[in-house]
Amino acid sequence: MSAISEDDAGQDSDIAQLEDRIEQLAAELDKCRKYSLAARAMLVLGGATLLALLLGVVRFDGLAMAASIAAILGGIVLWGSNHSTAKEAAAHLAEAEAERNALIDRIDPRVVTLRPTLH
């Protein structure tokens, strides 16, 4: 059996660290998707409430109007900031995956094929 060189062990730990980073970035992207959904819900509910108030479907109330406008503005802000965070995380994720693939290619793994059995 051949011994594993220190360089191979270092590359293995680098790959493991990159895989951990990739998992963290994937979790961050998932969180961004959830926030994006919440922002869209705020926009829709705030807009629907404001429209209902303005059309007279619901009795006009200043507090409800202020709350619907706040929901619309909050949804816009949340969606915008979350969108830029998601783009940044996606770029970092692609960079980490490319770096991991480069390290794996540098190791030059062998393809293991199964031998046919006689049974």
Image (tube, grey):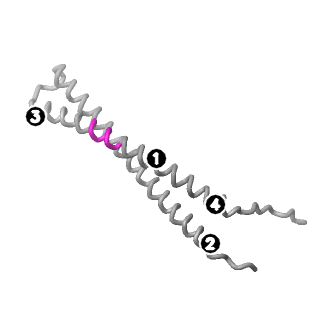
Q: CA distance from mark 4 to mark 2?
A: 13 Å
Q: Nearer the viewer, residue 115 or 9?
A: 9
Q: CA distance from mark 4 to mark 1?
A: 21 Å
Left or right: 60 with respect to 42?
left
The quadrant the C terminus occupies is bottom right
- Tell me the residue that label 4 is attached to: 104
- Residue 63: which disc? 3
- The answer to whether the residues at label 1 and label 2 have Cβ atoms under 8 Å apart is no
Q: Provide the secondary structure element on which disc 2 rests.
A: helix
- Residue 90: which disc? 1
Which label sits in the foreground, 2 or 3? 2
Q: Which tag, 1 or 3, sits closer to the chain's start?
A: 3
Q: Position of residue 59 (x, y in %)?
A: 12, 25
At horizontal 70% and vertical 62% (from top left) the residue drawn is: 108
Which label sits in the foreground, 3 or 4? 4
What amino acid is found at the position of numbered circle 4 in the picture?
Answer: Ile
- Residue 95 lies, with reference to residue 4, above or below; the image says above
- The answer to whether the residues at label 2 and label 3 have Cβ atoms under 8 Å apart is no
- The answer to whether the residues at label 4 and label 2 have Cβ atoms under 8 Å apart is no
| Residue 106 belongs to the span the image colors magenta | no
Q: Position of residue 30 (x, y in %)?
A: 42, 49
The quadrant the N terminus occupies is bottom right
Q: Residue furthest top?
A: 55
- The answer to whether the residues at label 4 and label 1 have Cβ atoms under 8 Å apart is no
Task: Name the image quarter holding residue 56.
Answer: top left
- Tell me the residue that label 2 is attached to: 7
- Residue 35 lies, with reference to residue 18, above or below; the image says above
Q: Nearer the viewer, residue 44 or 22?
A: 22
Q: Magenta span covers which residues?
A: 76-82
Which label sits in the foreground, 1 or 3? 1
What amino acid is found at the position of numbered circle 3 in the picture?
Answer: Leu
Q: Which tag, 3 or 4, sits closer to the chain's start?
A: 3
